[in-house]
Image (cartoon, grey):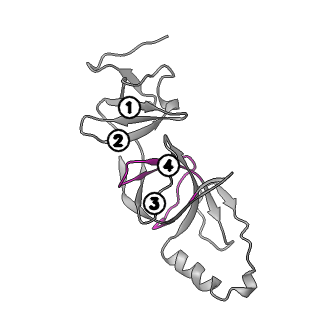
Amino acid sequence: MDSNVSFNVLNSNIITGFGIIVELENVENGFPKNGVLKSTKSNLFWEVKNRIIEDVNEKRFEIEEEVQSHLNFNKDNNPNRVNIFKLKEEKNIRLYKIESIGHSEKPEIGESLVFHYTTFRKKIKIKEIYHDYCLLEDENGYVAVIPKRKISKNAQIGDYVRHCEHQYHDLVDENDNFVYRH
């Protein structure tokens, strides 16, 4: 499922040697480390790695893992700094380091991202397997990702995953029969 709350991408950059930095508007409660963001436009996914703190007075969230930025500007010589900070706080603008899942794209400026969590009651097919995630798609075209740690290490593309209450999901075939592999 995807959250009903969307986050507007104000800025997005790939920093060589560091990764993708994204500035999002409308982030009221923060994101947990390893939380997943999904584009409502492209169905691409990104994993949240850290919140980037630019100012000691920024609103903080307990669920986030933070990294301090070291911006190279003289705070005393920037009279608009206080106004910019207030505007960012009013619009809940936050900066994050994110990592793409199964692709190498950054979010586009103006694009909407939603917080993504995979909840399903019916079986859902494994379409791709990445380093830490599996890309899933149901019969209606809904696309999702799930951490590989939540399914069998023997999962293969084309298998189906069926939800279990214990958060470790079963592998099944197209007829809902369990798949066992050694």
Report whether 130 appears left or right of 97.
left
Instruction: Indicate which disc, 1 or 2, sits on the residue closer to the N terminus.
Output: 1
Q: Which mark is residue 143?
A: 2
Query: Do residues under tags 3 and 4 come within 8 Å of each other at their CB atoms?
Result: no
Q: Which mark is residue 168?
A: none
Task: Tell me which residue sits at (24%, 39%) in the image.
Answer: 140
Q: Is residue 77 left or right of residue 1?
A: right
* Residue 26 visible, this orientation: yes
Q: CA distance from mark 3 to mark 4?
A: 12 Å
Residue linked to disc 1: 127
Spatial CA span between label 1 and label 3: 24 Å
Residue 126 point in image, percent of width and height: 38, 29
Pointer 1 with pointer 2, Cβ within 8 A: yes
The magenta-colored residue range is 21-49
Amino acid type, label 3 = Glu
Name which of mark 3 and mark 2 comes first in the sequence.
3
| Disc 2 residue type (three-letter) | Val
Amino acid tagged 1: Lys
Residue found 55% across the figure and 46% down from its top: 34
**Residue of label 4:** 46
Q: In this picture, is 13 found above or below 173?
A: below
Q: Nearer the viewer, residue 182 or 15?
A: 15
Label 1: how many Cα within 10 Å (few below 14, some 14–19, many 20+): some
